Amino acid sequence: PVAPARPRAMGGEDAWALFGSDDEGTDGAAGGASKRPRSDGPPDVSGAAVGGIGVASDVTGAGSDARFGAPEASHTTLYDHVSFAAARALWSGVEGRPPELEAFVAALTADAKSRAPEVARALRAHRPEGDAAADALLATADALARCDWASVASHAKAATDAHARQLDHGNWPHECWQRSHVLALGSRIAGSLRVSEKENDVDARDSRVSAATISGTTDSNDGLGRVALEALAMVTLEPDPTNVPAWLGSAILLAEKESVKRSRRELSTTKKTRSRNSRTETEKVSETKTTVLPSVLPSSLLAWTARLDPALAVARVSADATSPAAFHDLFAKKNTPVVIEDCVSPSRGWAPLERWRDLGEMVAAAGERLVPVSFGGHGDAAGDAAAAGSVTEMALGDVIRDFIAPDIAIRRDEEGDFPAFDRAPKRVAYASQHALFHQAPLLAKMVGVPSYTLGRVKADRGAVNAWVGTAGTKTALHRDPYANLLCQCAGFKYVRLYDARETRFLYAETPLCDGNENTFTKSAVTVENVDVSKHPLFKQAAFVETVLSPGDALFMPKGMWHYVRALTPSVSVNFWWN
C-alpha cells in the first residue's frame, strides 16, 4: 500500500507514545524491512506502487497539522544532543591547549595498570576469544609499565585482533570488550608514536642509520590513522560520557597529527614526480577558484532528471506541513520511503544552506582532521579495482583542496554560475560514512537533529555520519540494519531504492561478520552498468528513484536496498537509528 492522498486520523499525537523522546529507552516503532508478501504477478509500475514502495503523491493536504499536530517549534543541534555527550567529554580535556605525548602516555599507563586486571578477568568469561583478548591486554599493560614500545604496539594489536575475531561470532557480549578495545587502541597509538619518536631521534643523531634497524618499527607504524579513527568510532558508540578516558582525546589528536604529516609527505613525494609544466589543467585552475558547491543543477543534468519516470518517483512531502507524528503513522510505521523537503533549514536547527555550500568553512573548522577517503566510490567494485590501495586516510582540507575544489573549477561553464557536471571527474574521492561531527564540535553545531528520527538517535543504537566528496561518487547497492534519514546539505545526489521483497533479484553477497546484528548486506550488481550475463534476474527488480537537492531528507526504512550516486560535488549527513 502507498500513502493515501490525504492523511487519515491514525492515532494523531498518540503516536508519540510509540516512539518516545530522546531521553527514553525502549523503541516500539523501529522500522523493519518490509515483510509484506510480493504479488505473484508482474510489479505495478503504473504510478500507484512499485514493489510496495510509496511514490509521489500529496500526503499532507489541508488540515494535516490539526490531525497530527504541527512540527516542533524548537530543534536540537547535534552538539547539544544526548547522543553527543561522549564527544563533548572527549574534547573537554584538550580544549585550548595542544596535546602532549608525555602526559598522554603517563595517563594511559596509569589507567592500564589500574583497569587492565579487572577488564581481563571479565573477558575470560566469554568464548571464543576472551582468553586471547585478556592475555594480550595484560601483556600490553606490562609492556607499558616497562616502556617497551615495540612490545606495546605488538601486544595491543594482538588484543584488537582478538576483539575483531569475537565480532565474527556476534556482538560483543559485555561492556568489558569496549573497555579493552579502547585501552588497546590507545596503547597502539602510544607504541606507534614512541617508536616514531625514536626513529626521529636516530635520524637526527646519524642520518646514515636506517630507521628500519629499530626493532618493531615497521609493524608498530602500520595503520596509525585507522587506529585513530577507530578510537573515535568507539566514542560515538558510548552512551555514558563518564566511560570516556581522560587521555583519549589527546591520543586521537596526536595520532591524527602524525598521520596527516605522513599523508602529506607521501603526497609531496608524488607531486614531485611531475614537472611544473606537466601539471594537469585541473591543478592549475584550482589555484584561483573558491570551493563553493552548485546551488542548482546544470542544464545537462536537468535534462537527464527530466527523463526520470514520474511513476517511479519517491513520495515527497513538505517539512512545514508534516509533523513527526504524521511521518511516523504514514511512513515509518508502514516502512515507506519519503523525501521530506526543506528538512535541512535554519528553522530546524541547521546552519543555512549557503554555509554548507562554501567548503571553506568546513576547512576552517576541520581542515586538519583526519578522514577516511575512498577513491572511485564507496563500496563500488569498479572504483576499487581501478585504484590500488583504494582507501586511505588524509586531512579533510587536503581532500577538499586536492579533489573537490579542482573538480568544481575545471567544470565551470560559460555562464560562470555553476559547474557543468555532465561527466564523472577523473579523480573521484569520497570521505564517506565518517563521524566527522564527533571530531569537529564546531561542525556539530551546524547540524540539526531532525524530529523525524523519532527520538531514536542513540549513541549505542545508531550513528550520525558525514559524506563529503566529488561528483561521481557511488555507494554500491546495499541495505542497512538501521532506519536511515539521508539529509542533503549541498550538491545533488541520485538515489535508487529497492524494497526488501526484491532481494531475490539483487544477488546479495554473503555479509562480513554475518553473526553480528549490525551487519550491512551488499549486492554484487553494478546498478547503472549491469552485466546481464552474470545478473540476468536484476532487470526484474522493481525500484523507485529520486534526486536529492539541498535541503531534502530521504527516509529509508530499515532493510531497504539503496544505491546512491553524486551528480555534483556533495555534502550529506545521515542519521541511523533502531
Image: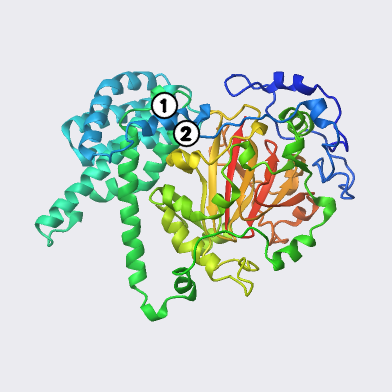
Q: Position of residue 418 (x, y in %)?
A: 62, 65
Q: Disc 1 residue type? A: Trp
Name the residue tied to disc 1. 177
Q: Is residue 129 above or below residue 319?
A: above
Residue 366 vs residue 251, the one in the foreground: 366
The kind of secondary structure element at disc 1 is helix
The kind of secondary structure element at disc 2 is helix
Task: Name which quarter of the figure residue 243 lies in.
Answer: top left
Residue 37 vs residue 425, the one in the foreground: 425
Spot the residue most to the left: 205
| Residue in view at x 79 percent, y 44 percent | 315
Residue 423 vs residue 67, the one in the foreground: 67
Q: Is residue 530 above or below residue 80?
A: below
Q: Position of residue 531 (x, y in %)?
A: 69, 61
Task: Name which quarter of the figure residue 146 lies in.
Answer: top left
Q: Position of residue 185 (x, y in %)?
A: 35, 36
Q: Disc 2 residue type? A: Thr
Q: Is residue 397 left or right of residue 150?
A: right
Q: Is residue 207 left or right of residue 422?
A: left
Name the image colouring.
rainbow
Name the residue tied to disc 2. 236
Residue 363 vs residue 205, the one in the foreground: 363
Quadrant containing the C terminus is: top right
Q: Is residue 287 left or right of residue 299?
A: left
Q: Is residue 387 visible?
A: no
